[in-house]
Image: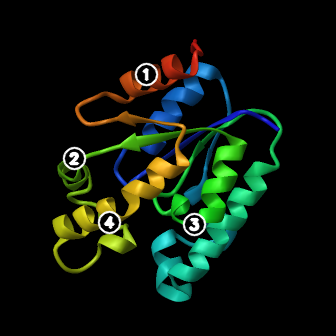
Amino acid sequence: MGEHIILIGFMGAGKSTVARSLSRRLQWQLLDTDSMIEARAGMPISRIFETEGEASFRRTESGVLAGLAERRSPVIISTGGGLPMREENRRVLRQMGRVVYLRVKPETVCARLASDTTRPLLQGGDRKEKIRALLAERGPFYEAAAHFAVDTDGKRPDQIAEEILTALGMSGN
């Protein structure tokens, strides 16, 4: 099985952006689970939540992960923020390769997602409080799934990518 690099963490942590940087540096293909789910469903995630519900979305998410686990050549995988919440997903992630938790503070998420209206779990109510509560709930699951964590606050994506590659004993182009 390929030794993939898998980025996990909360929405707004920088998973997609850092994944692009890693992909460029290593010349590895980048796969994004949320994009794969949207392509499979033929609609954006917000619409999936609206029409089919979160439980249906999470089942699809687990199915996409299972498909990625079959890949042989190493790839960079950027995951959706809720993917590591299921025990089965955490187990699969750790078997697939090196799992990196991009850790972010609630204040940073609030700033980065201030004008984002596409996140179903942040709609309605006090956004800052929702972010704090979700981060507190999800943090232990991210920690359990990850081989190591990298703090992203105040760092550029290329700095984070370099930190990941150094921790993995790899070098990019």
Colouring mode (rainbow / by chain / secondary structure / one colour): rainbow
In front: mark 1 or mark 3? Answer: 3
What residue is pinned by disc 3?
86
Callout 3 environment at 10 Å: few (<14), some (14 to 19), or many (20+)? some
Mark 4 or mark 2, earlier in chain: 2
Q: Residue 108 bears which disc, if any?
A: 2
Question: At x 45% / y 74%, what residue is drawn?
Answer: 46
In front: mark 2 or mark 1? Answer: 1
Residue 5, position as x, y percentages in the image: 61, 35
Q: Amino acid at mark 1?
A: Glu
Mark 2 or mark 1, earlier in chain: 2
Numbered disc 3: secondary structure: loop
- Between 123 and 41, the one lying in front of the other is 123
Mark 1 or mark 3, earlier in chain: 3
Q: Residue 134 bears which disc, if any?
A: 4
What residue is pinned by disc 1?
163
Question: At x 66% / y 63%, what residue is drawn?
Answer: 88
Q: Please report contact status of discs 1 and 4: CB closer than 8 Å, yes or no.
A: no
- Residue at mark 3 to residue at mark 4: CA–CA distance: 15 Å
